[in-house]
Image: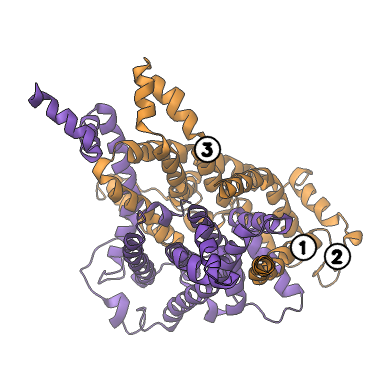
Amino acid sequence: MAKRSQRFLWPALAIPSFLWLALFLAIPFYVVLCIAFGQVDPIFRTSIPAWNPLDWRFDQIAITLDRIFGANNFYLPPITRTITYVVTAVIVSLIIAFPVAYFTARYAGKRKGLVLVLLVAPFWISYMMRMLAWVNLLQTDGLVNSVISLGGLLPLEVNWLSGKPYTVVMGLIYGYVPYMILPLFAALDRISPSLLEAARDLGASGFDVFRRVVIPMSIPGIAAGMLLVALPMMGDYFTSDLLSGSPDTSMIGNLINGTIQTPGQSGQAAALLLLVLLVLAAPMILYTRTVARSETRS
Amino acid sequence: MTISAAPVDMAMRDPELGRSRRWRRQSSTPKARGLATVTVIYLLWSLVPVAIAVLFSFNAGRSRSVWQGFSLRWYTWDPVGSVANDPSLRSALTHTLLLAVVATLITVPLGVTLALALDRWRGRIPSGANFAVLMSFVIPEIALAIGLLFMITLLATPFTLGTTAQVIGLITFQLSYPVVIVRARMLTIGKQYEEAARDLGATALGAVRRALLPMLYPAILVSAILVFADVLDNFVLVRYLSSDASTETTSMRIYSAARAAPTPALNALATLVLIASLTVVLLGWLAYRRWGKSEGEESSLGAFAGNF
């Protein structure tokens, strides 16, 4: 009796959220598929989704692929640019995040709490506000220009906000590096100091300990951090819009955002979206499975 | 002999003392000082620009880079441009807060029931749902936003773009927070309390409600704070799912105005949302600490970092 009531309790608790996920997560993705594999009305330029998978056509996919790899490949530059920007930003983020996380985990001592609060602070500050802060600083008459020109003494006035790739990459790093520091900190903090002492006692030099104990043990944190930073960057269009606004720095996110607002191109937008999801599928599934496994481990 | 051994002995008996001594020794090495310098520079780089933006929200003039004296002009008394007197800024602020409250109130119960079900109900269906929830955490937000946008514009949904659509999108996107955090807490609690309640005559639901749920309150609180603060920041979903100016949020307002010669009122608007976010986090943290003490649980900042 008791067992039976328990058996029905868990599914009953799950019903509302299952319905929710089916309606607002599964159906939207199915709609994206139906549009990507659908047609476009030749006169009204509206999208005709193919609801039945048997009716799926590859016209929109073909158009999209042609714009990436064909003769008139104007989709390609934003894609290669995104890869360059994201790879650069992730590497620089790791170079910044590792020493900061390492210091906080091992050397911050009594100040660890304070340092952690400051490291977490960006999470509570809206991304847009953080970008607005840089827009203010990098204006032509902003503080950065007045500092580097020593208050107007030197004829140095850089137009930071007009299509400068380094400004956009800096913005991406600034925006997402906190997401890398925290998983790295968690991984480094878990390494027991006695393990490092044992390595020293067995004759390893300081560098050996770092290379052969600390680095291998922080690999999961490094991987999680790189992933958590890279995934949102792949869909980001607002950083480039705010810190450059020029097509010279547009990324995949800008491409998708632009096509979605052009009539008759929702098919291409859906196809581009699928392409991004396809490329990201492997790392996303890897991350999801790792987290799911750590959840059931008790 | 006994005198010289005393400090070592003390350090061994009191690990806290030993740790602080070791720290003092380590923190004076050049390596530690170098790392400390990098950390301080990083923290300055990370926080000073925002502090400057907050500072200039109090500027008496129109400039966002030249200080012209302190005033609350852009908050209250400017008859046209201040947050209090510009209807569009005021509505952006209230709409942002409205979305955060409504989305949090729905996401948290939905996520908690899902976490309970996923943790105790074994099988293929719940593990598939778990996978879906975790995927919703890592998929680029733009994918979910465009999917919902297509769905709402192409299918005869009972709601249109606007507040309802924004709330629905936000709930779907945020659902993973309560699920992951509450499940992590359930792992450390185990099943014995519920089983004891059942043995004492509680029904299945009663055991969950009266034995398990109270132990989950700290985790539920943490996830509510994370969801609330994250919704305040949300941009991609709320923008695609908005309808007109009345459903514009603070982040959308910053996005559209930041490059169009804004006044410090924009900084003031951003600062007000920042204050809302920090207030909730601070209140939540204080509550969590009190709770944590009574539960004999270590109050950890890590949980607040979404560091599950």
- Write down the chain letter for disc 3: A
Question: Which mark is on residue A50?
Answer: 2
Distance of mark 1 from mark 2, alpha carbons?
10 Å
Distance of mark 3 from mark 2, alpha carbons?
42 Å
Q: Which SS class for mark 2?
A: loop
Of residues B76 and B234, which is closer to you in this image?
B234
Viewed as shown, does residue A162 lie left or right of B124? left
Q: Which image quadrant: the N terminus of chain B?
A: top left
Q: Height in image: A16 above or below B19?
A: below
Read off the residue under disc 1.
Answer: A30
Asked if residue B189 shows in the view, the reply is yes
Asked if residue A140 shows in the view, the reply is no
Read off the residue under disc 3.
Answer: A220
Marks 1 and 2 share the same chain: yes
Look at label 3 and name its amino acid.
Answer: Pro
Q: Which residue is rendered at x = 56% and y = 70% of the image?
A: B238
Q: Residue furthest top?
A: A203
Spot occupied by residue A37 in the image (x, y as percentages of width and height):
83, 58
Q: Which callout, 3 or 2, points at the residue further toward the start of the chain?
A: 2
Look at label 1 and name its amino acid.
Answer: Tyr
Question: How many numbered badges does the structure rendering display?
Answer: 3
Q: Which SS class for mark 1?
A: helix
Give neighbour class at mark 3: few <14, some 14-19, many 20+ (Cα, 10 Å): some
Chain B painted colour: purple
Of residues A168 and B157, which is closer to you in this image?
B157
